């Protein structure tokens, strides 16, 4: 039994680690302790130059959260995007405003052809339906067919994704001085978000924030 359509049952809810409380203001990773008035930053964000302004995530990438992300990404479970949109709204409520443009992180066309859908685009469209915010699913284009990033170190991820994402030439008019929220299923090192953010900034975007369904933490 679940409380609502597309909701989680009691046991799945218990085993899902929703991120809340004290978090890194830049990447959304949770901290132990209490949130003060000043924005806090994790060790990684103190040493890595993040090009975006704020980052948020809804779930920790472990237990049921990890299973849901993998089911959405590889298991044809498009229905997960609907409740996930509500979790993303809760996580990102302080980075949205009336002029926000929601943009999914893109897949290369070869991977899209193989998978048949972009899970980040599913999340972004569901988020737009719930909030009424504008979405541009093809604002960004992945021009380099990078191999899977799984198992790669932080430096390798950033090097592989350098200049791998571009603005769609027919969408440049939508981005000038506009607030952008980039949406992806998982944030690990932040390399993909960084490449997407830099592409937006080169095209003249205003404020850029990032929002992930799940955040990989060191203890996750």
Image (cartoon, grey):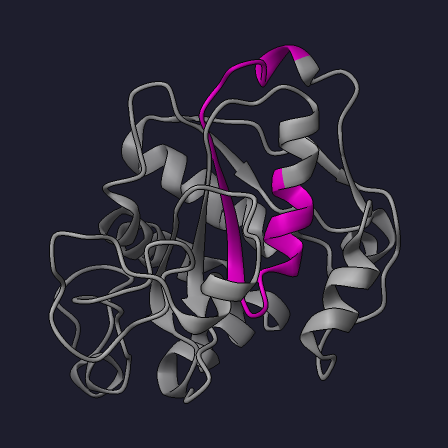
**In the rendered image, is residue 10 in sight?**
yes
Closer to the camera in the image, 182 or 209: 209
Residue 134 falls left or right of residue 161: left
Expressed as whole percent of the image width and height from the top left, the position of residue 215 reads 44, 69
- What residue appears at the point 38 percent right and 88 percent down from the top-left corner? 63
Residue 14 falls left or right of residue 163: left
- What residue appears at the point 33 percent right and 62 percent down from the top-left corner? 24
Closer to the camera in the image, 123 or 78: 123
Q: How many marks?
A: 0
Expressed as whole percent of the image width and height from the top left, the position of residue 84 reads 35, 58
Q: Which residue lies furthest to the front in this view?
A: 47
Expressed as whole percent of the image width and height from the top left, the position of residue 47 reads 53, 65
**In the rendered image, is residue 77 in sight?**
no
The answer to whether 60 is drawn above or below residue 51 in the figure is: below
Residue 97 in the magenta stretch? The answer is no
Q: Which residue lies furthest to the top in this view?
A: 173
The answer to whether 187 is drawn above or below residue 127 in the figure is: below
- What residue appears at the point 62 percent right and 50 percent down from the top-left corner? 194
Expressed as whole percent of the image width and height from the top left, the position of residue 6 reads 29, 62
Residue 184 in the magenta stretch? The answer is yes
Residue 38 falls left or right of residue 83: left
Instruction: Report the magenta residues as a range.
Output: 173-197
Closer to the camera in the image, 162 or 124: 162
Where does the C terminus fall, quadrant-wise?
A: bottom left
């Amino acid at each position: 039994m679940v409380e609502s359509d597309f909701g989680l049952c009691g046991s799945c809810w218990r085993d899902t680690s929703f991120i809340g409380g004290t978090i890194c203001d830049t990447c959304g990773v949770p901290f132990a302790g209490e949130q003060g008035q000043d924005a806090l930053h994790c060790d990684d964000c103190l040493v890595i130059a993040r090009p975006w302004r704020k980052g948020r995530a809804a779930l920790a990438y472990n237990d049921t959260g990890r299973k849901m992300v993998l089911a959405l990404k590889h298991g044809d479970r498009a229905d997960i995007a609907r409740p996930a949109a509500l979790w993303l709204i809760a996580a990102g409520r302080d980075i949205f405003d009336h002029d926000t443009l929601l943009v999914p992180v893109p897949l290369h066309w070869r991977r899209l052809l193989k998978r048949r859908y972009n899970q980040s685009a599913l999340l972004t469209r569901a988020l737009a339906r719930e909030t009424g915010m504008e979405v541009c699913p093809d604002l960004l284009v992945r021009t380099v067919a990078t191999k899977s990033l799984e198992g790669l170190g932080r430096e390798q991820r950033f090097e592989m994704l350098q200049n791998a994402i571009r603005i769609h030439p027919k969408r440049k008019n939508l981005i000038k001085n506009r607030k952008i929220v980039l949406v992806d299923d998982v944030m690990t090192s932040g390399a993909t978000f960084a490449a997407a953010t830099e592409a937006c900034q080169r095209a003249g975007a205003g404020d850029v924030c990032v929002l992930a369904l799940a955040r990989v933490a060191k203890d996750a």
